[in-house]
Amino acid sequence: DLDKAISLEPSNVFFWVERGYLFETTERWTQARDDYSKAIELDPSRALTYTSRGGVFLQLETWARALEDYNRAIELIPREPRAWMGRGFAYNGLKQYDKAVADFTQAISLDPALAEPYYGRGVVHHSAKHYDLALVDLNKAIELNQEYLFAYMERAAVYEAMEKYEQALADYTTAVKISPRYAQAYLDRGYAHLTLGHQEQAVADMRQALDLSPNTNFKETVLRALREAQE
């Protein structure tokens, strides 16, 4: 019981980090942030705690705070690709796309076998509406990891932006196969079906998304989509 462990030994950094991680895995972002902050207060030299808190700030879309944490992590461990990737996502959130691309490129140079920095750079190119460049990077991410759910989801979104809906549909279908309980994949595939005039398939996917909805806000989004599909 980490709560009890912390009450008995409040200066133990490990306990705060572990509980922060548990909060993070259950998407309790503010609690995770606070526990990582306590861990940093106790030991400001531990680089991975900055990357962990930076990741929480990304989830909270607190881009400037994420940037601060990843800057500190890079100072402490300049050859850690994930620190550069995290800062790349922070720059992307701040719409500083050139800096984001540079950081993901640096992460690739540190470990070219990692799929994640290619994915991240693809996300940035998508944000900047450089769709052809986005596809190059997302294709590479998928080549390196053929089970990379979010690379397929992102590539599908790029295809939709390019009005290549059949290709988008194929990628969403792959995403569903990789993660059959991922509600977002069904919802997005439903939208793709709807765009292509496949009303019956769209409704079926959206109903599946509704059944798998992880929270109330997502459920409300799906219900609106279902009403649109059934009109």
Image (tube, rainbow, N blue to C red):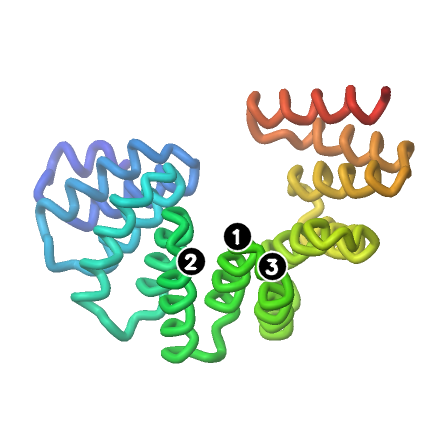
The quarter of the image holding the C terminus is top right
Name the residue tied to disc 2.
97
Q: Which mark is residue 151?
A: 3
Viewer-nearest residue: 39 or 127: 127
Q: Residue flagged by tag 3: what amino acid is it?
A: Ala
Q: Residue at x 53, y 60 (%)?
A: 125
Q: Which mark is residue 127?
A: 1
Q: Position of residue 183 (x, y in %)?
A: 66, 37
Q: Position of residue 203 (x, y in %)?
A: 84, 30
> Label 3: few (<14), some or many (≥20) within 10 Å?
many
Say what secondary structure mark 2 lies in.
helix
> Label 1: few (<14), some or many (≥20) within 10 Å?
some
Viewer-nearest residue: 6 or 77: 77
Q: Position of residue 144 (x, y in %)?
A: 59, 74
Q: Nearer the viewer, mark 2 or mark 3?
A: 2
Q: Position of residue 154 (x, y in %)?
A: 61, 54
Rendered image quadrant of residue 15: top left
